[in-house]
Amino acid sequence: MVQGPTGGGRGGMSRRGLLKVGGGAAFAGVSIAALKLPFFSTDGVVQDPASCRAEDLSATQRKLVVSNWPQYIDESDDGSPTTLTNFEKRTGIKVSYNDDVNDNAEFYAKVRNQLGGCEPIKRDIMVLTDWMAARMISLGWVQPMDPKKVPNVEKNLIDPLRNRQWDPDQTYHAPWQTGLTGIAYNSAKIKEVKSFEDLLTRSDLKGRVTLLSEMRDTMGFMLKVVGADPGKFTDAEWGNAIDRLQKVVRSGQIRAFTGNEYTQDLAAGNILACEAWSGDVIQLQFDNPDIKFVTPEEGLSLWSDNMLVPNLSAHQSNAEEWVNYYYEPEVAAQLAAWVNYICPVKGAQQEMEKIDPSLVDNKLIFPDDKMLETTFDFMPLDDKQTTTYEGDWANVTGG
């Protein structure tokens, strides 16, 4: 789900891919069998985070290795302090920050053999989108965070991001940045596009519409269109949704399924409306205020890229200091002012007054309650569902 001065996305073909325990005994009894999460039945790779863990060397090794998406943290051209340099100065922890997460599936393939075999990946934090975070948690590849060391998460996480199906108590994850999937259109060329159904049916849009190549984004809306709940649906409802999409594709309504390249076509006028990520639209609006972001009548898809501590991290306490630090409202506001995605931290909007007042009322960074109450999530999938649904998706989209 990345955004900075050059923009970003969240799926397989996104700009990311084109450029996206302390307390010892307290957690010793946490068993993967007790998580009640959807398992991905991959033989020989499921681990128990209670037993697949390393000695925490944080007290003697003040360092931290982070893997994140490109263009996903504030930078400085003139040597002024950034959130990262301020963290290092405050804590004495030297951060090795890597922007080596270009695609969720690609990163999974990179670390699968090590994490599946209870071997270290030499990282202390990895940032992954909801569905991949759910997968890694369900496989037992992620360490629980000590709530006493990350109190700011419980205190400041915005309410719409709580109680996720795959980690309802935020035991294993903390959102880094969050985004919305909705609709963008050029208001100078066409009348308002009010719904996903409009994208699929309006004759004035035929051949000049794009949908996202990220299956969960587009199919979440297709499930809504056929009257199903993306957060809990049946195989039959999935079938109805994929059949409806197939008919729309055959009709010629859809120009293409894309990653972030839709931004170029929308800016150039090659397309008139599209499924879009909120952070991208902010960037487009800097150059063209006629580009509008719409909350579809079907609602908005809400997603996050999440901080996770992998098994055998040797610096978990340092990682927890990092997580807790980024949930301070003033730090979160500084980060949000640069990346332009939804800030997951309460109080950051007030702090933004001191940093960039022009962003305080931007609903694509600080959405109001009315906007957030329309949001929905996509159901976690097991391996069988993933194989079947991704196959169906590829058959329709050619992906």
Image (cartoon, rainbow, N blue to C red):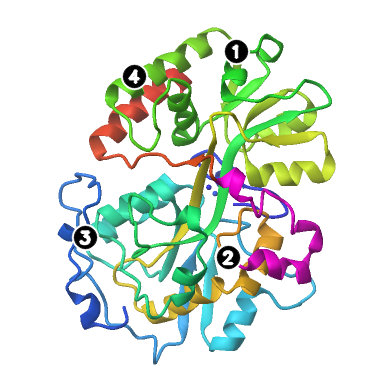
Please name the residue shown 35% across and 86% down the image: 57
Please name the residue shown 29% across and 20% down the image: 236
Tell me which segment is drawn in magenta. Answer: 346-372
In the picture, the disc for residue 201 is: 1
Dot in front, 2 or 1: 2
For the residues bearing labels 4 and 1, Cβ distance under 8 angstroms? no
Residues at marks 1 and 3, CA–CA distance in whole angstroms: 49 Å
Asked whether 371 falls inside the magenta stretch, the response is: yes
In the picture, the disc for residue 117 is: 3
Which quadrant of the view contains residue 35?
Answer: bottom left
**Counting residues from the N terminus, which is met first, the one under dot 4 or under dot 1?**
1
The residue that disc 2 covers is 346
**Residue 161 percent across, percent down from the top left:** 47, 55
**Counting residues from the N terminus, which is met first, the one under dot 2 or under dot 3?**
3
Question: Mark 1: which amino acid?
Answer: Thr
Residues at marks 4 and 1, CA–CA distance in whole angstroms: 20 Å
Q: Could one spot residue 75 in this view of the protein?
A: no
Question: Mark 4: which amino acid?
Answer: Gly
